[in-house]
Image: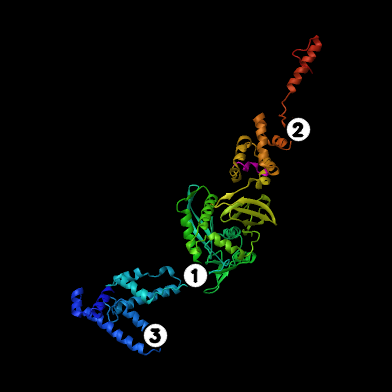
Amino acid sequence: MDQKADILMKYFRENKSQRAIARELGISRTTVQKYIKDFKTKHEKLMELKQDKDGNKIKILALIEEMASKPKYDTSSRTRVKLTEEIINEIDKLIAKNEKNKLLGRHKQLMKKIDIHEYLVEKGYDIGYTTVCNYIRENYEKKEAYIRQQYDLGETLEFDWGDVKLTIAGKATTLNMGLFTTAKGSYHYARLYENQKMENFLHIHVEAFNKIGGIHREIVYDNMKQAVKKFVGKNEKEATEDLIKLSLYYGFKYRFCNIKSGNEKGHVERGIEFVRRKVFSIKTEFDSIDEANEYLAERIFKLNSKKRSWLKNQSPIEILNQEKKYLLPLKPSYDTSRRVEARVNKYSVINIDQNKYSVPDYLVGKFVTAKIYPNDIKIYYKGNKIAEHKRSFKAHHWTIDINHFTDTLKNKPGALHSSVGRHQLCPELKDIYNKYYTNNPKDFILLLELIKEKDLESILDAIKELEEIKTDIVNTDNIKNIVFKLPREIAFIEPEKDTSILKASIQQISALNQMFNLQSIGGFEN
């Protein structure tokens, strides 16, 4: 461009000849002649267009742009040196093969540009990888156009899942981070879970609504299985029953993205990467998931409090506060459980997610309903809660409450020692069993019933009181006497000793005394 300007300036302003200009600038006289001729031609055409004022404004502006622009090389008449018609036909066939595989659902068997280039080289064609890429890009790839979105206050909230790799209690663990992001101000709410099951999907909604203080009128999802039950058509989806119930209760509308269109919920798509990097790039080791969630909440609060230039120097929290008066009103927390019906097997347990949980042994063979929460499982029979367990995330793990088996163990006390339930007793009860009940399991079963009737703390206090007197008197009867505050003289009666020999001896001595008129010896009395 500088060269073109120098040539035209020296020719039209300084009136120098083309030969002098070429010699002075050290370039070909043909180049000088081309620039001057092109400028003169366009100038003459411009004067002609100016005389005809009607309808030539666009042409005049285009001509002025050409005159003042950088010179362009005319490549229209160039012939292809290596990209021959034969190679083009081969590329077209391979692209057509890709399209056929797409229709057949073979999306993982499509050839990439590098594969097409390697195929051509193997067939003996002399062609460069860049040339192949340029041809495919020009003829088959179309850049997608995006439409800038504008959101009203309280209108849209976006949700997505993302993976986070942490070390929990010394073990490398991949957790699932659920993330909500507001479309208006990119306010984030996130929480970590063991998996993406429905109970966690529902739980994070309730937690987010409570944290935000209201409900946005629309929530956007991708095609996750917790939200989409099935595809009805190419672009139509049927929502899951749980999502429908949740939306009816809180009053929000739901919308699904098109397939492979993460940009339609771009705030949360970028938010997953942003939150994961900002929160867990340095600190990655925690004693528990609860501790990791506490740390996540602290860090997100700081991120939400930071002012952003693109928010006109406001923070996401400030924008959320502006949204609150436009949100749907908050309701009492929705029941986030996933419900399953299960039959109690012969071991008096039910199977949930490949793990076993005990129920009272009188329910063997019956059907019960389990309400599965993120960290707990509550089990009901005919509407009454009959068991509650901490949820296990191990594989094929048994969670047993030994109190569920007291009736069976009364009939089979010998089964207690090696039972799974005994091994899962709390440390205090394990210690009591090992000290005082290994040879009397039936009495231990009565102790378990006593704990159920009272509480473990009272039982432990009673045992401690008995141990201070004498360890030999620690048994269920004496524990019961203390717990129910029975009289002390009854509480500590030791087993009676056999005194019949002593009594017989005293009677004989008395008879001898009477016979020989002797005084009592040693103070014995009948």
Quadrant where the C terminus is found in the figure: top right
Q: Determine whether, in the image, residue 375 is placed left or right of residue 111.
A: right
Q: Nearer the viewer, mark 2 or mark 1?
A: 1
- Of the residues shown, which amino acid type is indicated by label 1? Ile
> Is 126 contained in the magenta span?
no
Q: Is residue 391 visible?
A: yes
Residue 259: mark in rendering: 1
The answer to which of marks 3 and 1 sits earlier in the sequence is: 3
- Of the residues shown, which amino acid type is indicated by label 3? Lys
Q: Is residue 53 above or below residue 338?
A: below
Residue 57: mark in rendering: 3
Q: Is residue 125 visible?
A: no
- Give the image quarter of residue 244: bottom right
> Is 413 contained in the magenta span?
yes
Mark 1, Cα crowd under 10 Å, few <14 / some 14-19 / many 20+, is few
For label 2, the residue is: 487
- Give the image quarter of residue 140: bottom left
Q: Position of residue 64 (x, y in %)?
A: 34, 81
